[in-house]
Amino acid sequence: MADAVKVEDSTLTLGTVNVQGATSGPLSTSSVLSSVDILGGDILEKMPVNYSWELFRRAPGVMLTGFNQGTTSGKISFRGFNGEGEVNAVKLLIDGIPSNSNDGNMPYMDMIFPMELDSIEVVRGTSDARYGLNNIAGNVNMLTRTGGDYNKARFRYGSFNTQETQLAKGIESSHWTQNYFFAYQKSDGYRDHADADKFSMSGKWFFTPDDDSYRIGLIARHYETEAQEPGYLTEDDARHHPEMTNSFNATDKGTRRMNQVSLHFDTDLTNTLAWSAKTYVNTLDDRRWTQYWRTSSQQERDTYETQYGALTSLTWRPEVIWLYDFALEGGTDVQQQQNQSERYRTRDRARLATTRDQQFDFDTYGAYVQAEIKPFESLKIVPAYRVDKIQGDFTNEMTGTDYDINDYGLIKQPKISIVYSPWDVASFYANWGRTFQVGTGAAAYKIPPRDTDLAPSINEGWETGIKFTPADWVDGRVAYWQQEASGEVSRRLNDPSGESDNVGETRRWGYDVQMNLHPDERTEIWLAYSWQYSKILQPSATLPGSKGREIDHIPHHLYNAGISYDATPALQLTAWMNGQTNYYLERENTKGTYGGYVLMNLGATYKVTQSVSVDLQLKNLTNRYYEYVWYDPDGAQGSLHSPGDGRALYTGVTVDF
C-alpha cells in the first residue's frame, strides 16, 4: 500500500490498473477534472456476468437497465439519464475507438468479455473536450490488454445451464506484442424461451522499434450471437410466474453480428511534442423479431451499419519558466456512418408488410483544443473548447424520396475545469461545460411536415466536489452536479417513422458520495451512493401535462457497497450489494412507480496452486424479486414487466499457465 501522496486530480481507482507514463502521449483520462472512476481488470475478471454492461455494477453512480430480452439485454446510463434508449447520453469507446450505434445504443459493448479487460474508465460530466457525438453526460472507455506474456483460461458453469469459456494469450518480445482472445458462452436463461448463444474473438498486434520512437498497431474483433426473447408479462404474471413466457412470444428472437478493426499509431515527434492517431471501421448486422403484446403485431427490426473514421491529437509539453507545468493539446476526429434501417410486420417471423425502409448517412466532424495549466504545484486549470459539425443525407426507400439533414450549424462547446490542492490529502475541484444532443435516425433530417432546420439541444452542466485521501488506507470523493438541456429530444422507440418527440427544456441534478477503504492488508471495503433528480422545466406543446414532472425511468437513489476479505493467503471471501429506488414509467408521472430493488451477493475464491484458482459466486442471495417495467400506450395500454434473474450459483476455474 502506497503512502498518501499529494492529490492533484479528481480520479478514483478501484483495483489494480497498469499506469502509463504521463510525460508523453495524449493527456490521460485522469486529466479530466470531473467524476472519473477507473476500474481495474483484477476486480472485473471473475465477476459473474452474462453481458459486459453488468460489470458496471461495481462503478459508482452508474445506473443499469436490464431489459432481459435476448440480444437487447440491457445498458448503462448515468447523471440522471435513463437507459430506455430514448436519449442515449453516454459515449462508448473500446480501446479509444467510438463504439455507439447510430441511435446511441451500445451493442458493441457485448464484444468484450471480463478476462479481456485491462481497465474501464468512466467519465461523468460535461467537461471532457475529447469527444462530441453521444458525449452528452460523459463517456466510458473499455481498455483491453496490450502486451505481456501470459496464457490464461477461465471456465464457468452455473445456474440456468450457463456454460462459458474464456481463453487469453499474450506474447511480448523486444519489438512485438501480440494479444489473442476467444470467448464462448451459452445459457438457457432464467425465464422460459430465453436461450442465448454467443462467441467473441479478437487479436491485437503492436510493433515498437529499438529506439521506441513510435508504436503502430492493429486490433481486430468479431462477435456473433443468437438469443431468444421471453417477452414482457403483465404485472400479475410477472409477480406469480416470473419464469414464464407468453405463447405469442414463441418465435421472438434476435441475431447480431459485429466487427471492429482499428489501426493505432503513436509517436514522439520531438521531446515535447507527441502525435497520436487512430482509424477504424465498425460493422453492425442486427436482426430482431419482437412482439410486445397479444394484440400487437410481431415486428422484424433490421439494422445494418458501417461506421468508419479517424481520431488524431497533438500534445505539446514545453517548459514554461513562469509556470509549474503546462501542456497544450489539439485534436480532430471524423466519424462517418452508412446506415440502413428496415422494419416489417411479421407473423412467426414471416414478412407480411414493410413498415420502414430507410437509408441514411450521418457524418460528424469535430475538433478541440485544451490546455493543462499549473501556475503552481497546488493549482491546475484546464480550459477547453470543442466544435462539431453534422452532415448527411436520408432516403426513404419506400417512396424513393431524398431529404437533407438539419443544418445544426457549428456546435460550439466551451469548457473549463479547475482543481486546487491546498493540502496533500485533499483536492477541491469544479468544472463547467457544454455538450450537445442531435436527432438520431430520421429525426436528424428535414422530413415533412418539418421543413425548417432544428437547433441542437445544448446541455450545460457544472460540478463541484472534493476528493480526499486522508490516509493511505482510505480515499473518496463527494460531488454535487447539475445539467440542463435547452431542447431535449426523445426517440419514438416503437414508431416505424424513426422520428423523435420534443421533451422540452429539462434539468437534472444530484449528489455523489463514494469511499474506498483498506483498513488492513487483508480487507477492502467500497461504498457508493448517488442521489439524482430530474425535472421537465418547459415541456413541448404535445405533452403540456409533463411540466414540472420527472423524466421517466430515473430512480432517485443508486447505491452499491461491498467487502473483500482475505481469510487466508489462499482464500478470499467477498460480499456485495446493489440497489436503486422506484421510478416513474412516463413523463406525466401518472402510471405508478416501479423498479426498485436491493440485491445481495456472495463470492469465494480459493487459490489451489499459484496457477489455478476456483471460485463460487452466489447472485441474488435472498432470491429477491426485481424487474424492469415500461408503459405500453398502444397494445397493452398498461405496464409491461420483465423479471430479473432469481437466485443463481456459479462456479469457475481460472488457470494461468
Image (cartoon, helix red, strand yellow):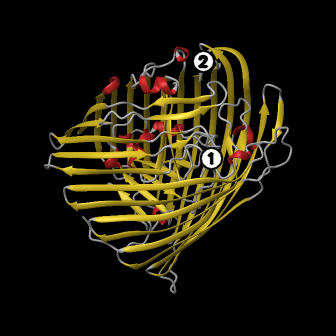
User: Which residue is painted at 32% across and 31% down in the image?
Assistant: 647
Q: Nearer the viewer, residue 375 or 51?
A: 51
Whole-number angstrom distance, CA of label 2 to CA of label 1: 43 Å
User: Which residue is painted at 46% across and 66% down in the image?
Assistant: 24
Q: Badge 1 is on which residue?
A: 309
Q: Residues within 10 Å of mark 2 (few under 14, many from 20)?
A: few
Question: Where's the C terminus, which quadrant?
Answer: top left
- Residue 639: give x, y in percent of width and height: 57, 31
Secondary structure state at the residue bearing disc 1: strand
Secondary structure state at the residue bearing disc 2: loop
Asked if residue 18 can be seen in this view, the reply is: no
Q: Residues within 10 Å of mark 1 (few under 14, many from 20)?
A: many
Please tell me the numbered disc located at residue 28. Answer: none
Q: Amino acid at mark 2?
A: Arg
Q: Badge 2 is on which residue?
A: 294
Residue 14 falls left or right of residue 443? left
Mark nearer the N terminus (2 vs 1): 2
Q: Nearer the viewer, residue 378 or 362?
A: 378
Question: Where's the N terminus, which quadrant?
Answer: bottom left
Q: Residue furthest left?
A: 568
Q: Amino acid at mark 1?
A: Gly
- Residue 552: give x, y in percent of width and height: 59, 44
Asked if residue 165 can be seen in this view, the reply is: yes
Q: Tell me where residue 340 sits by quadrant.
A: top right
User: Which residue is painted at 74% across and 32% down in the image?
Assistant: 497
**Residue 423 in the image: above or below residue 599:** below
Q: Nearer the viewer, mark 2 or mark 1?
A: 2
